[in-house]
Image (cartoon, helix red, strand yellow):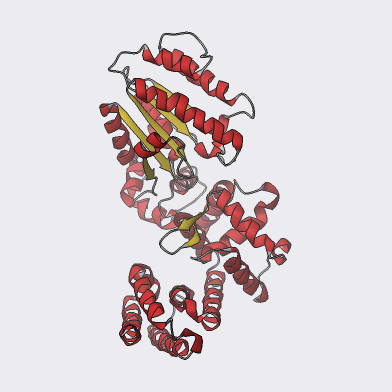
Amino acid sequence: MPNPIPYSSKEFANRQKYINVVEKAIQQGDGLLNLFSVTGMGKSWLLRHLRYLYQQRDDVPVLFFDCTQLPPQDQQRTILQEFSSQLSEQGIPGPGEASSAQALVSRLEGLPDTHTILFLIDSTERLKVDTDEGRDLAAWLQEELIWTTQQRMRAVSVLAGREPFYWTLYRLREAAHTEELTPFTMDDIRELLNVLRVEQSLARFIYRETHGYPHGVRVLIDAWKHGDLDTLKNRKAAAEIILRDVIRDRLCAELPADKREDLEQILFIASILRRLDAVTLGDFAQRLAAAGERLPKASQDKGFYIEAVLAFKDAQLVRWDADNRTDTVEETVRQILTTNLRVRNPKRYRKWQSLAAEMYKDWMEKYPANFDVWLTEWLYHSGEAQTARASRAKKEEEKKKTVIQVGQFIEQVQKQPQMQWDLASVAENLGVRLSRQEQLLSRVMGEDTFKSVHKTVQDWQPREIG
């Protein structure tokens, strides 16, 4: 289990958007909000703050439960016991521990019509709905407590987990509003710095190192306040703290303990790739090994990469990208990992990006039917492999080389006999992909280079489609 920063109402900031959604539901007396995000994004902090806010009001009894506290047995009784105890603490009349969900709901029915019950249920991934016991408990929680309460009185429910909660009851699923908790913006960080009485000019540096990842933001602020970081401009020192307290002690905490060190190394490798599956990861890792990188002994077995991707999925570090129809390391996590590697070891970072570019170059030749996919990946990794310190003349040379190579790739694909029926669709798909990824590719390649590449593809596209 990760070691979260203890909640304090005096140190809470940001997240007003989500608080406003809950407050609107409270005023209407009806609502169902489903929050999800990768670990460390601030779900538990938000729910604990909602509990603090509404316990100050006499008209909103709050029932809070953290699913990480569920015991192996007597889970329904544990929830009923906790809710009953909380009602007593808030001065709600009725018997002590409710013997059933019906008894608890009956106790709530004695409240005035103006009251709104607020259910706050955290860490719903711990319900383990992929098991029979987990499905039964989740169904009981939804049907016997949340649904029954909402049918009889004013009630609002907020559930939070690492993935969207699966609603078994159709009417609840239809009414649920799902929101992904997003990273902090620069303004959010400034607000937090103000609350913590820290110089707000540090916001830009903190955002650059953490990409707004809330747990990382707090880690760096606390390190600076406690004197563990002499200056937040010391990027390498900050990167070591991020590696220790964010990547290892938070992001990797849910990985299997006996494989954690190996999986951490593979997760760094996976973060270089924007498209992820066991084949892609395995091929890329083997190229790294051939180039002299030391990999875990277990990685010599191809099945290791299947297990690694599954472990990352279980920890919610990898998710499905519907736009590109592929798995990918969760974007904020990927940014943290790649930034951390680039700061601590820039030569290794460029080496890895260069090897990834070579891999996609090889794939373009072997699998021309996927040319549209592999070219965009080659462009991305080639751009990331370039050093920022290169001379202007060197950069201009690389830009021209990139555009020429794109033209050469197109010529090679056009000559493939088996591609003649597919050229039109590949050309069209490539144009769409480039347009969709314009912002990303412009950043890594430079805007002028991207425009030249795009024009090369556009010139090809009408010839093939026409």
Q: Who is closer to the viewer here, 304 or 152?
A: 152
Location of the C terminus (image quadrant): bottom left
User: Going by the image, does 110 lie left or right of 348?
Assistant: left
Residue 169 point in image, percent of width and height: 44, 34
| Residue at left offset 33%, top offset 39% | 18
Q: Who is closer to the viewer here, 185 or 85?
A: 85
User: Going by the image, does 182 lie left or right of 243?
Assistant: left
Q: Who is closer to the viewer here, 141 or 61?
A: 141
Residue 130 point in image, percent of width and height: 57, 42
What is the residue that sits farthest to the right in this orientation? Answer: 297
Residue 114 point in image, percent of width and height: 27, 17
Does residue 90 lie above or below 147 as drawn?
above
What is the residue that sits farthest to the front in this orientation? Answer: 421
Residue 442 seen by the camera: no
Residue 307 seen by the camera: yes
| Residue at left offset 57%, top offset 53% | 312
| Residue at left offset 32%, top offset 87% | 463
Residue 308 point in image, percent of width and height: 63, 57
Does residue 171 lie above or below 180 as drawn?
above
- The quadrant where residue 3 appears: top right
Location of the N terminus (image quadrant): top right
